[in-house]
Image (tube, helix red, strand yellow):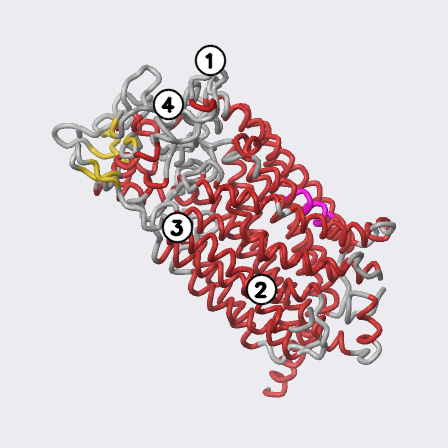
Amino acid sequence: MATDSSPTLELTSERASAHPGEASAIDASLRTPLVVLIGSALVWLLIASVLGLVSAWKLHCPGFLDACEYTTYGRIQPAQTNAFIYGWGFNAAFAVSLWLMARLSRGALPGCGVLLVGAIFWNAGVTLGLGGIIAGFSTSIEWLELPGFATPLLLVAYALIASWTLVVFRAGRSHQIYASQWYIFAALFWFPWIYTIAQVMLVFSPVRGTVQSVVHAWFTSNLFLLWFASIALAAIYYFLPKILVKSVSNYYLASLAFWWLAIFGSWAGISRLIGGPVPAWVQTVGAAASFMLIVPLVILSMNHYGTLAGRWSAALSNLTLRFIVFGIVALTLVLLAWVAGALHGVAAITQFTYFTAAEAQLGLYGFFSMVVFGALYYIVPRVLGTTWASSALASFHFTASAVGVILLVASLALGGIKQGGLLADATVAFADVTKATQPYLFAAFIAGVILAVGQVAFALNFFWTLGRVAAPAVTTAKNLLSAKTEAAR
Amino acid sequence: MNRASIIFLGVFGALAFSFAGLVLTNQLTYGSLTTHVDEDEGKSFPQQTPGLAAQGKLVYQDLGCVTCHTQQVRRPGFGADTGEKSRGWGERQSVARDYLRESRVLIGSQRVGPDLRNFAARKNADGTDLTADALYRYLLDPTLVSKDSAMPGYAFLFKTQQVIGEPSTKALKGLPESLAAAPGYEVVPTARAEALVAYLLSLKDTYAYPETKNVYTAPVPEKKAAAPHGETKVEATKEGHK
C-alpha cells in the first residue's frame, strides 16, 4: 500500500519521506468532527431508507397510510429525497471532503469547535426542514422542498463547515494542488452560490413565470454535477491511484475535464425542460451543452478505466475500490443517459416517467453514495485508529448496495420506458398505464428493502466500531467516577 | 494548476458564465413578459386566480400534489399531450405566458398521475363537464371513480358532522356503506377541500395567445403536403377563446 499522505507516485516521494507521522496526526485532529458528521450522515441514511420504503410501498399500494395527511405520499416522498440529499449526502460529503482536503494539503485541523457548531446547525436545519415538509410547509419545489424557515440555518451551518475545510487547505504545508483538491475547492464555492440563487429567486423573492423553471433546472442539475459529482470525483481521483499504487492514467487531461464540466456542464441541466413552456433557445442550448458532456465523459473514462486497466483484480479485491469501481461505472451510465435524454425522440418518451427517477437514483445512489461508502471504509478506521468491527458486515453492505442499486435502477428505468411508451399512445387508458407499471414498482420496492438492509448493516458496523474505540474511555471515566465517589465517602 | 488564486478565478468565472447565460439572460429577456390585453374582451390574460382557488393552490402545495402531477402540456409530437390522437390534456401547448400570474410555478417532473394544467377544461368520458361534487368523491376515495387509480385517498380533507336542521348542500351523496356517515350524520368537505377543488376547477388554459398559434408541430404524413414547406403548420385561428 502507498504511503498515506499522497495519492499518486509522483507526489509520494516528496511528501511521505519527510513527515512519516504526519498522516496519523492529521487523522487524529479530524477525529471528533468526522465522527459527528459520519454518525449523523448514517442516521439520516437510515431515516431516508425507511421513508423510501414507505413511499415505494405507497406507489405500489396507494391506500397504505393515507388516512393521515402527515403520511400522504406527497409529503413522505419529498421528505425521503431531502433526508437523503441534505441529511445523508451533505453530511457525508462534508466528512469526505474535509478528510481529503486535510490529507492532500497536509494540514491538521487547528481546532474543531466551529466545525462542530456547523455540524449541529446543519443537522438542526435539516431536522427542522423535514419536520416542516411533514407538517405541510413544503415549498413543493423539487430538491428544495425544505421550507424557508429552515434554509437560512443551513446556509449559516454550511459557511461554518466549508470555511474550515478551506482553512485546512490554506494552512496545509503542501504546495501541490491535486485534482481532488480542485474539485473540492470548487464545489465548496459553487454550492452556496447555486443554493442562495435558488432560494432567493424561487422561495424568498420569486421571479416571474417559468423563469422559475429555468432557475430550478439550473439548480438541480448543478447540485448534482457541481456538488455531489465533484465531491465523488475528488474521492475517485484520490483513492484509485492511491490504493492501486499507480499514477492516474492520462492525468494531464484531468484539468480539461474539470474545466469542461465547470464551464459547459453547468449549462447542461436545462435540457430537462425540453418541450416545456420555456423559450426554444433555452431548450436548444441545454441539449447542446448536454451533448458536450461527452468530452468530460471521455476524459474521465480515460483517467478512471485507464488507471484500472490491467489492475481489475487488484481493484475488486479491495473493499473501498469495489465501491468506487461501481461508482465509476454508474457515472459513465449517468452521463450517457444525460446525453441521450437531450435527444428529442428519447425525451418525448422518458420525460416525466420513472426513467428520470432511475437516473436520479443512479446518480445519487449508484455513483455518489457508492463512492462515498468506499471512501468511508478507508477513512473511518484511520481516523479512529482501529479496524472495522466486522468485515462480514462490510462485504454484506457492498453486496446489498450493489444488488439493490442495480435492481432499483433497472426496474425504474424499464418501468419508465414502458410507462412513457404507453403514455404516448393515447388509445391506452391512463389507468392501464398505471397497471402496467405495477410489477416494476414492486421490483423497486424489493430493491428498497435490500438497500435498507444493507444500510442497516453499514450503520451497525460503524457504531459498533465506534463503540469499541470508545469503550476503554468510557471504562476509564467510570472508574474515575467511582474512585471519586469512594474518595468522597 | 498549482495556484489557488487562479483556480478560484476560473471556478468563479465558470459558474458566472452559466449563471449569466441562463439565469440572468432569461430573467432579463422574458422575466418581464407581460399579460396579453385582449381589447375585444376588455380583459388581460392570463387572468388572476380567484381568491378561494389561490388558497387551494397552497393546499395543493402543502400536500405535495406536484410530486405526481405535472402542469405543462407539451407540444404535439411530444408524447400524446395535445393535438390529434392525443390524450387531450390541453387544447394547445403550454407557453411561458400561461404562468405569469403564479408566484410559484409548479410545472412538475413526474406523471404518476395525469397532467393537470388544463384540468378544468377537460370533459368526462361521457362528454359532461367536471363538477365539484365528482371531484370531492374522487378526493375522498379515488377508487370510487377509477378502480385502478394510483392516487391515495384524501379522507382527511373531509369531516363527518351531525345533521342539524336541513342537510348541508355540500354533503357528499351516494357514498358506499363503508364511507357513508351514520344516520343523522353527513360527510362534508373541509374548507381546505373546498379551496383545493376550487383551485383544480380554475386550471384552464384555453385562451389562445398570439404565440400559441405559430408553434412548430410535427409534420403529419399526408399524401399532399398541405402545410407550407411541409414542416410548419400555421393554425389560422384568431386569438381568443376557441
Magenta highlight range: A326-334
Residue A390 in the figure: left or right of residue A44: right
Locate residue B25, reporting x and y percent: 42, 53
| Badge 3 amino acid | Thr
Dot 2: what SS?
A: helix
For the residues marked 3 and 2, what is the alpha-carbon distance in whole angstroms?
Answer: 30 Å
From the viewer's side, name the closer residue of A106 and B191: A106
Residue plotted at (41% across, 45% down): A70
**Dominant secondary structure (helix, strand or loop) of the stretch shown in magenta:** helix
Whether residue A342 is in magenta: the answer is no
Q: What residue type is labelled 2?
A: Val
Other residues around mark 4 within 10 Å, as few (<14) / some (14–19) / many (≥20): some
Mark 1 to mark 4 CA distance (whole Å): 48 Å
- Amino acid under disc 1: Lys
**Which residue sits furthest left?**
B165
Kindly identify which residue carries mark 4: B144
Circle 1 or circle 4, nearest the eye: 1
Q: Distance between the residues labelled 1 and 2?
A: 55 Å
| Vertical order, A324 against B200 (above or below) | below
Residue assigned mark 1: B224
Amino acid carrying label 4: it is Leu
Within 10 Å of the Cα at label 1, are there few (<14), some (14-19), or many (20+) other Cα atoms? Answer: few
Give the CA separation, mark 1 to mark 3: 51 Å
Q: Specify which label sits upstream in the sequence, 1 or 2.
A: 2
The answer to whether residue A372 is visible is no
